[in-house]
Image (spheres, rainbow, N blue to C red):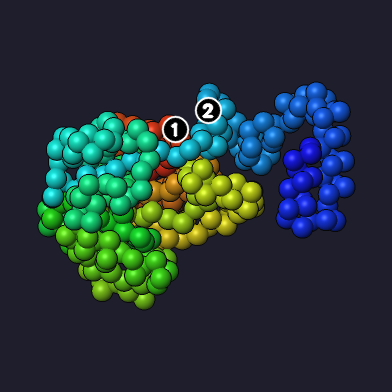
Amino acid sequence: VDQAVKACTLLEQWSVKGYVNALLRRFLRERSAIEAALARDEVALYQHPRWWIDSVRTTYRVGWQAILAAGNSHPPMCLRVNRRRSDLQAYEAELSRQGMSAHPCGADALLLERPVPIDRLPGFTAGHVSVQDLGAQRAAHLLELAPGQRVLDACAAPGGKSAHILELAEVALTALDLDAVRAARISPNLERLGLRADVHVGDAAQSSQWWNGEPFDRILADVPCSASGIARRHPDIKWLRREQDLPAFATRQLAIITELWRLLAAGGKLLYATCSIFAEENERVVDSFMGVEPLARRLALRDGQPAQWPPSAEHDGFYYALIEKQV
């Protein structure tokens, strides 16, 4: 208490000295009762808004506490090795030589034991590696890419998933984003990796602004969402987001994939993706879309994993659904 009051003096906060003194002394007097009350308060216990807690508990009946705990944890730092310039084993060995410990956690992924500044990553400037969460790295693999395909990455900025697509296959990639400032980051990020794409600024829900009429074989619809699966990277999201935001996101998400569906070639595949953990933005949007598109057929994900990955110690929260346009 004494140190806090002295700090007020040092900061010249004369008017709050009495308040700080009284508040801390009351806490010391009533500490047991206050801590007991906090232990019964789920908002205080789980450090998430009430509606968020209720939604997670309803959707994830098993393990919901772990999902909330992950949302308060330090996020992992996962690397994606550019297979065009290095390989997983060689890069892991190079990290070890530099005194950094990591272990493989995916086809192109290394999970660092401890996060480091990117300028400490060997070969980063030369394009040997990128920082990308393991959950985000699922996208390019789930697209089932093949050489020569025309691929659209809608809502692409800053280009991480676009880069991974180009690292995996020789495809003609169009990268689209509504935000001109963020879209301007795509080409420089690709150039560092020795890659290129046709970058456009435009609204994925209004293809007449930017589409040339040639259908795409693959479309990644990484739609705007609540970002609830990556909230630990942006802690203010938990407290700024409102429950009523979810229907608005869902309306926008459905509009985007409905429009993009027109751009998909017969036999082509659209991968719907969010970094959300809420069913309103995930299964319910996909169900609504499937209910009105007779040629849409949902496919199993090739990695054998569930559509929804909640956040964990190894990855953020992501959702994927692969939909084929039947001939």
Q: Which of 291 and 260 is in front in this view?
A: 260
At 18% from the left and 39% from the top, the residue drawn is 94
Specify the farthest residue to the bottom. 209
Q: Which of 159 and 139 is in front in this view?
A: 159
Q: Say what amino acid the circle numbered 1 marks.
A: Ser
Side (left or right) of 253 relative to 50: left
Above or below, 172 against 275 in this view is below
Tag 1's secondary structure? loop
Q: In this orientation, does residue 265 appear? A: no
Tag 2's secondary structure? helix
Q: Return the mark for residue 312.
A: 1
At 40% from the left and 57% from the top, the residue drawn is 257
Residue 87 lies, in percent from the top left, at: 15, 41
Side (left or right) of 263 relative to 81: right
Place residue 212 in its image quadrant: bottom left
3D distance between C-alphas at marks 2 and 1: 8 Å
At 39% from the left and 66% from the top, the residue drawn is 182
Q: In this orientation, does residue 316 appear? A: yes
Q: Return the mark for residue 66.
A: 2
Q: Which of 192 and 306 is in front in this view?
A: 192
Residue 305 lies, in percent from the top left, at: 33, 32
**Sooner in the amino-acid sequence: mark 2 or mark 1:** 2
Is there CB contact under 8 Å for labels 2 and 1?
Answer: yes
